[in-house]
Image (cartoon, rainbow, N blue to C red):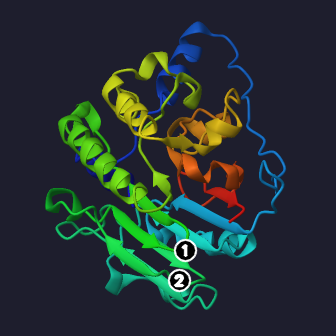
Amino acid sequence: MSKRAKKNVEAAGDGEPDNGAAPEAKRSKKSGKEPEAPVLYEDSPDRLTSEDGRPSSLKISSWNVDGLRAWVKKKGLEWVREEDPDMLCLQETKCAEKSLPAEITDMPEYPHKYWSGSEDKGGYSGVAMLCKTKPLNVTYGIGKEEHDKEGRVITAEFPSFFLVTAYVPNAGRGLVRLDYRKTWDVDFRAYLKGLDQRKPLVLCGDLNVAHQEIDLRNPKTNRKNAGFTAEERQGFTDLLEQDFVDSFRHLYPERPHAYTFWTYMMNARAKNVGWRLDYFVLSSALLPSLCDSKIRNKAMGSDHCPITLLLAV
């Protein structure tokens, strides 16, 4: 997508937050001081056993690809084949099902593939789920037309859990969609709680919120920006209070500089000026099965990096 088109999408409220990279660069230039060396994040070795000693038996990966066709051209599928997850969830595919590239639709590794896109806008939103094992059932959306027409949620039921992939709506530049986002948060939370009452769930995807100050590089300058408003952060807190857990922060409560999104502007990724917007949220009943929650920040191909969950189920 061109820079002009990207700006138009962001202005419409479905882009990503301004992560503060540009203001920081301007301050350094004005002060005449040498910019600080970037503090990079090193993904630690995978933990392959759960707290009760069971070996990891399930791997789920999630990635906001910022345009599926461009991501395929950038060799995103090479990372997928190397990571080899049992389930792969993608967000912001921006691609109608009829336009999907053969490189992904023909992947024999994932015989069960599910797609959902925006009904009204081409090149907007969209999620996908690719599975090695056939789910018991697959549904699209959360049962409310005002949300479901944008193609933001796929839910797959497996014998012992639900897997939900979501691309949560952005509050937009100038917070033009913040009221809608607040409505979404309430409705999505009710949907997830309904699933959780039937069996535990794994929610993954771009949830478009940095929950705590530790989850973005520049919290002070972003308090009134999409993704870090008090309302969005409270929405995520309210979700966790419904007996759900942010798997990464459960395992690594104080680990800093762990981000999953960096704007393309101002060399933000090389400087690690980013946000943690992508999550694996679990029903608390699945905590005994949690082995690890990974941020694969070396993987390129999008303005987000993939994340991976390891479970013993």
Amino acid tagged 1: Val
Q: Is residue 163 visible?
A: yes
Name the element at disc 1. Answer: helix
**Is 200 or 179 nearer to us in this picture?**
200
Identified at 65% across, 57% down, the residue is: 309
Identified at 60% across, 39% down, the residue is: 259
Q: Quadrant of residue 78?
A: bottom right
Name the element at disc 2. Answer: helix
Q: Quadrant of the C terminus?
A: bottom right
**Residue 301 left/right relative to 189:** right
On screen, 140 above or below 182?
A: below
What x and y, as percent, mark residue 72?
Answer: 55, 74
Which residue in the structure is indicated by mark 2? Answer: 104
Query: Label 2 near label 1: C-beta < 8 Å?
Result: yes
What x and y, as percent, mark residue 171?
Answer: 28, 39
Q: Quadrant of the N terminus?
A: bottom left
**Residue 84 left/right relative to 120:** right
At label 2, counting other C-alpha atoms closer than 10 Å, the crowd grade (few under 14, some 14-19, many 20 or more) is some
What x and y, as percent, mark residue 203?
Answer: 48, 55
Q: Earlier in the sequence, mark 1 or mark 2?
A: 1
Amino acid tagged 2: Ile
**Residue 152 left/right relative to 273:** left
**Residue 129 left/right relative to 179:** right
**Is 45 or 160 nearer to us in this picture?**
160
For discs 1 and 2, the disc positioned in front in the rendered view = 2
Which residue in the structure is indicated by mark 1? Answer: 72
On screen, 225 above or below 169?
A: above
